[in-house]
Amino acid sequence: MASSSPSPGASLDEWRKNATFDGGKMRVILQGGREKLSLKDEIWQTLEKDTLFKKPNRQLSLDEVRLLTHQRWKKVIEYGFVCDPYAEYEKFSALLEVLEEFDTALQARVTLHSNVFMGALTSMGTEKHAKLIEKGNRNEIVGCFALTELSHGSNTQNIQTIASYENGKLVFKTPHIGAMKVWSGNLAQSATHAVVFAQLNVGGKCEGVHGFVIQVRDEKTHRTLPGIRIGDMGEKPGQWNGVENGWMIFENYSCSPDALLNRGCELTDDGRYVHSFKSDRDKKSVSLGALSIGRIGIVGKGVNACRVAATIGIRYSAVRKQFGPPNGEELPILSYPLQRRRLLPALSAAISIGFFQTKMVDLFAQYMARVLSGEKSDELGELSKEVHGLSSCCKPRSTWLGVNALAEARAACGGHGFLYISRLNELRDTYDPSQTFEGENNILVQQASNYLLSQKKQGVLSSPMGSTDFLQSRPCTFTGWKGDSIENVISAYEWLLHHTLNKTEKALEERKRRGEDAFTARNETQIDTAHPLAIAYAELTMIKWAIEGVEEIEDEKCRCVLRRVIGLFALSQLQPHLDLLYIGGYCSGPEFGTRVKEEQLSLELSLSPECVSLVDALAPPDFALASALGASDGRAYEHMVEDFRSREIDRAPFADDLVRVIQANKDKAKL
Ligand SMILES: Cc1cc2nc3c(=O)[nH]c(=O)nc-3n(C[C@H](O)[C@H](O)[C@H](O)COP(=O)(O)OP(=O)(O)OC[C@H]3O[C@@H](n4cnc5c(N)ncnc54)[C@H](O)[C@@H]3O)c2cc1C
C-alpha cells in the first residue's frame, strides 16, 4: 500500500468550506475572548514543545502515571504561568481550562490544592491562618480536602470523625472503620496539609461539623505525622489513576486549637466553645459553603466532556463513509439524520452551557469578593442561597450531559470508537465521577428544588442573579407556535416550572396532612415533581443566559449561527419534558409536540454544514486531544494505521508454547 495513496475517507476541509462564518472569529468567541484565548494559546505552545507533555499511546501503570503527573505538576509550577491565582484570576482560569483539556488528573492535582483546599482555608479561616494561606499560594505546602468517610458521603452532617478540645489541644480520633476519611485527592502521596471535617467535641458536648486545617506529613521527611495513618484507594478507571485519592485514620492525633477554621466561632483558652452563628443553618453555610466553589467549576467539566465528545464524534463522522444512494458514492456518516441526532445536541450543549458557565463564574467571583470583604447584607444572603440552589442543579445537569455525550459519541464512532486511541471510553471514564464528587448529582438536585420551594413559600419572587424571576410571570398554556423556537421553548419551561413547583408544594402538603413526616414526604415527592422541577430550573437558566451571551456578540454571522446552536440546545433539552407538558395540560393536540420535533430536526440539518468548523473553534490542539479519530487534519485512517503498524506482529512471545500445545493436541487426536 503506497503511503501517498489518497485517504479513503472524506475531507474535513471540504466540510470546512461550507461554514457561513469566520472560524477565527468564532474561536475567539467560544474560547472566552481574545485575551483569554491568547493566554491559552501561550500555555498550549509551551506544553506542546515539552516532551514531558507528550501523550503516551498506551495505558500506564499506577506508579508510572503518578510519577508522570507529579513531574508535570512540578513543571507547570516551574513555568510560572501564574504567580498569584487570586490576583491573576484570568490567567489562572486560562491555565485551569488548558489543564482540564489536557489531562483531568493534572488539573485535579492543581485545583485540589489551589481551589478546594485553599478555597476552604480562605473562606472558613481567619487571620490565624494567614501564614498558611501565603505558604499555600507559594506552593510551599500541598493541600487536600478530607470530608467524605467510608460510611458517610452525601450525609455530611453525620460524619463520625471526632475532634475533641482537651487540655488546650485538639485531639482527632477515628472511632471506627466507618469514620476513616476516604477519597481525599492529593492525600495518598503528596499532601502535607489537609482541611479535615469532624464533629467538634468540647467538654463532652458535640458542637457539630466543623472544618480544621492540619498538617499530615513532616515537611522535610514527608513521613506521616504520629497519630495519622494514610494510604491509597487503589486503581481507578479513566485518567483517575493520576489522582492520589487517599484514606486517613486518626489515632489520637494531637495539634494546636488554631487548627479550627474559626470564621464565626472560637475555642477559648479556658476550654470553651463560643460562636456568633445566628442559627444551625448559618453554621452549616460557613462550614460547607466552600463546596459551592467546586460545584461551579464542575459545570465546566460537563462542558468539556461535551466539547471533546462533539469534536471526536463529528470530525470522525465527517470523514467516515458508509452506504450511499443507489449507484451513487458512499456518504459521510454525518450526512445521516440519525447520526447528527447523536452528536449535534452534544455540540449545542458544549456551546450553550459554556456561555452559561462564563456568566456564572463572573457572578460567583463578584459574590466571593463580597463574602471575603465581610459583607453581611440581606441581599448577599439571598445571593448566597441562589448560588447554592443554581449550582446544585446545574452541576448535575452539565455532568450528566457530558458523560452521556461521551458514551453516545463512542457508539456513534462504531468499532473504531472503542479503540484506546479514539480516547472516547477513557474520557467517558474520566468524566464519570464528576456525577458523584462535590455532591452526588441526585442529592444535589434535591437541594435546588428545596431552594425554589422555600423561595416560593416565603413569597420571594425574584433573585439577585435573576434565575428565579420566572416566579413573577403568569404561566400561560400553549395557544399556538409564535416567533422563534427559543421563545416558544422558554414559555413552555416557565409554565413547566410553575406546574412542577405547585405540584411539589401540594404533594408535600397533602402528605403532611396525612401524617407523613417532612423527611418521608420529601423523598416520596422527588420522582414525579421535585426532580423535574430542579432539572427544568437548571435548563431554563442555561438557555436564558446562553442566549443573552449570544445577543452580545458583534459579528453578525457568528451570532446568527450561535442563535441556531442555542435553539437546538433549547429544543433538545425540552423534548424529554413533552410528557409532563401534555400530562399537565400545557398543550393538547399534535401542534406543540410536532413543532418541537420538526424544529429540532431542521436545526440539525441547517447546522450540519457548520458543525466541523464549530468544533474547530471549540477543540483543544491535536497533541492534547490525542485522538486518532478526532485529529483536525481528518486523517483518521492514517493515524489508526500508524498506530496499528507500530504493533505489527510476526511471532507471539508465547509462540513456542503455543506450537507445543497445538502439536500435543494433534498427537492426542491421533491416539
Ligand atoms: C473520583 C472521586 C474523587 C473524590 N474526591 C474527594 C475529595 O477530594 N475529598 C472528599 O472529601 N471526597 C471526595 N470524593 C467523595 C465524594 O464527594 C462522595 O463520593 C460523594 O459525596 C457521594 O458520597 P457517597 O459516595 O458516600 O455516596 P452516598 O451518599 O452513599 O450515595 C450513594 C447513592 O445513594 C443515593 N442516595 C443517598 N441518599 C439518598 C436520598 N436521600 N435520596 C435518593 N438517593 C439517595 C445517591 O444519590 C447515590 O447514588 C471523591 C469521589 C470520587 C469518586
Image (spheres, helix red, strand yellow):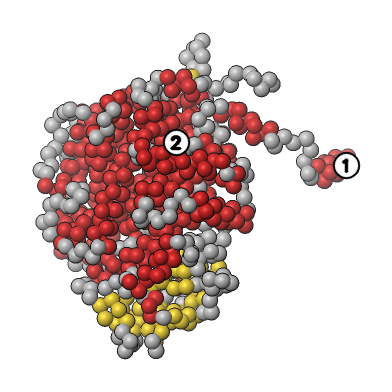
Q: Residue at x 19, y 65 (%)?
A: 376
Residue at x 40% of width, y 39% of height: 37
Residue at the farthest top position: 327
Is 7 placed above or below 442 here?
above
In-front residue for pair 94/319: 94
Q: Is residue 407 visible?
A: no
Which of 85/670 is in front?
Answer: 85
Q: Which mark is residue 619?
A: 2
From the viewer's perspective, tell me whether residue 594 is left or right of residue 310. left
Q: Looking at the picture, tell me which residue is in the foreground, 374 or 238.
A: 374
> Residue 532, image x and y in percent?
27, 48
Ligand 1 near label 2 (Cβ, under 8 Å)? no
Quadrant for the C terminus in the image = top right
Is residue 234 in view? Answer: yes
**As shown in the figure, which amino acid type bears the numbered disc 1?**
Asp
- At a point 46% along the width and 41% down the height, the residue shown is 42
Q: Amino acid at mark 2?
A: Ala
Depth check, front residue: 433 or 576: 433
Q: Is residue 289 left or right of residue 584?
A: right
| Residue 373 position in % (x across, y down) | 25, 63
Task: State the residue at coordinates (50%, 66%).
Answer: 191
- The residue to which callout 1 is attached is 667
Task: Locate residue 641 relative to residue 591 in the image: left or right.
Answer: right
Residue 392's mark? none
Mark 2 crowd level (few <14, some 14–19, many ≥20, 10 Å Cα): many
Say what secondary structure mark 1 lies in.
helix
N-terminal of the two: label 1 or label 2?
A: 2
**Split into 4 quadrants, where in the image is the N terminus?**
top right
Mark 1: give few (<14), some (14-19) or many (20+) Cα within 10 Å: few
Rendered image quadrant of residue 194: bottom left
